[in-house]
Amino acid sequence: MAEEEISSDSPSSSQPNQENPQQTQMLESSSSEFDPKTMRNTKPGVKRLFLTFSVLLSFIIGFPFLWKSIEIYRTPLPFTQIESFSSRIESNPLHFPCQFQAVFVGFDIRVSHGEVGAEITRKMYEFSPNASRCGVCSNYDVSVVVDSSFGCVGKGDLRGSDEDADELVKNCLGNGAGGGKVYSIVVVNEEEDEVRAVVGKYRHAWIVGKVSEEEAVCRVAEIFAKVFVNGGNEGSSIREEFMPVGADGRIVLSFSLLNANPQDWIYDWNFHEIDETLLQPVIEALQPIANITVESQVLYHTPKSSFSYWDDKHGSHIFSTKDLPFFVNSNEWHLDTSVAAGGRSKVLQLVVYIPSAKECPLQLELPNGEISNTNGFISPMWGGVVVWNPPSCRKDLESNDPVSHVISPQDLQMIFEVLMGQLRQLLGLKSDNHYAGQSGTSVLLGSGRGFTEWELDVLSRKHICFNLHSCATTLGSLSRLVQSLPRMIIMDEIGKQVKFSLEAAKFAQSNASNGIYDASAVSSRHSRSLAEDAFFHPSIMSISYYSFEHCFAIYSPFFLPVSMHVVLAALREWKRYKQENRKYLAWKAKAKVTP
């Protein structure tokens, strides 16, 4: 039985052994068709790809924040308007409308008034060939009147006092068509041979004497072109040294009384009275042109740097014009102690020098060998010096202590008249009261304010042009600077200053075109001041600017290596995923084909 069971179990046990070779053969055949290098039977995961691209995405999203953190704030500037304004100022000089009127009394003019006016205009262009420059009248508009409308001025009326004649002409012209800001000249033909021309302190002049029509036309044209338009100066352009006004539109007049050797004598002055009587009218007259402040000081132990010599002919110590560059002793003269001058204000030094006893009296010798009447000199853009010799140059040898004196009001009046003449020269006007022209000499009346109305017009025109040119130059430089430095910080305040500067310059041009000199001068002063404030703004001056290449060189050592690794890792992971996905797709396609 046992043998039968064993024999009966053997076939059953041997059956699987007979089937295993077949299955093994199938598995071997299928495994032989599956290539792990080109196929895979599972879908590739995206976890690694997701993590890698998440890191890359975080870098991409963070880049704008990084760029924003290093961004420079720049308010937009009107570059186009600045360029247009600068080119307009350079190509089209600013001209001012001026009207001229010639009144002839006692002439038998046979030609029409228009022809006489045209002849005067032609002569004016001959006297002023550079009429196209900035600061002069644009088109000469000359009108002519003969006798009828000006009967209040007759023969002999203008032969008396110049002050009375000035008021008479003013009243006569003010009641007629010549009022306002019209420059007028009254020519009275008389029997007397002496011809006298006087320019008043308003906007008119008069010529009296025996003159022909041709001579009268020539003299009228010269006074119009040379005096009323150009201020009596021969200069053909606006020179910077004749505009001693600070960039902020301020002038500080610093008056200094220097005692060279206080052991000889000590002098003081009553400056308060001079300030009220002489200086305040001048400050008010120049108010549209500049904001003027005044200060004074008395200094001691202030010897001059140059040497003088005794001259028996003049009976005084002499210093010549060759010694003027060495007269001011910058080591001993501590003049720059102004507390009123702040920012970019201009300080004009007006110095009264009192020599020591060993150099008294001290006189200035002119190049022609004559002694200067004013005994003073000016230095453009710096100021002026007046040498005042005490009434008695004898030192009190009996007293060891120096005697204190106060300059008398009469002497102080004379000194300040000279200083006011120097101030006029510093501003570009004539310091004397005569104009010697080609057709004759004219007397220039002075004004109690230091400046006549026609002189203020000349100063205003020159000052307006100078301010607008300076404004255009400054804004143009700022525009080029900002565009050349992309990393420059431009604050909102700078943008507002540039905007307001352009608006003020526009108002100045508009008012100048309409003949409103005072308002135009104030606007031009503000435009220049705002342009200077924008260019020298602290936010610009206190920071060093660098280019984008410099910024890239600073940050690339920190961020470039990490960024490159992240980008390369993302590329490798994307390449790996695509490769594994192709293997899976290849296996699926093989599985579908195989039955």
Image (cartoon, rainbow, N blue to C red):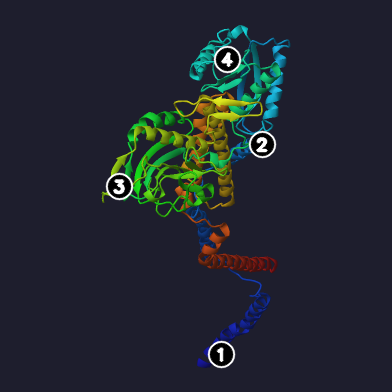
Q: How many marks?
A: 4
Q: What residue is disc 3 on?
A: 396
Q: Residue at horizontal 59%, vertical 51%?
A: 484
Residue 122 is drawn in which quadrant?
top right
Of tags 3 and 2, which is closer to the observer? Answer: 3
Q: Nearer the viewer, residue 381 or 448?
A: 448
Residue 139 is situated, as x and y percent measured from the top left of the image, at: 66, 24
Residue 143 is situated, as x and y percent measured from the top left of the image, at: 65, 16
Q: Residue at horizontal 49%, vertical 16%?
A: 164
Of tags 4 and 2, which is closer to the observer? Answer: 4
Q: Is residue 31 left or right of residue 499?
A: right
Does the CB distance between marks 4 and 3 fall below 8 Å? no
Q: Residues within 10 Å of mark 1 (few under 14, many from 20)?
A: few
Q: Amino acid at mark 1?
A: Ser
Asked if residue 343 can be seen in this view, the reply is no
Residue 509 is drawn in which quadrant?
top right
Of tags 4 and 3, which is closer to the observer? Answer: 3
Give me the C-alpha separation between circle 4 and circle 2.
34 Å
Compared with 576, 76 (above or below) is above
Does the CB distance between marks 3 and 2 fall below 8 Å? no
Q: Nearer the viewer, residue 361 or 274?
A: 361
Residue 271 is situated, as x and y percent measured from the top left of the image, at: 34, 36
Compared with 6, 88 (above or below) is above
| Disc ID at residue 91 | 2
Q: Residue at horizontal 60%, vertical 70%?
A: 41
Q: Amino acid at mark 2?
A: Ser
As helix, strand or loop, the secondary structure at mark 2 comes to helix
Compared with 549, 276 (above or below) is above
Q: What residue is disc 4 on?
A: 178
Q: Is residue 574 left or right of residue 296?
A: right
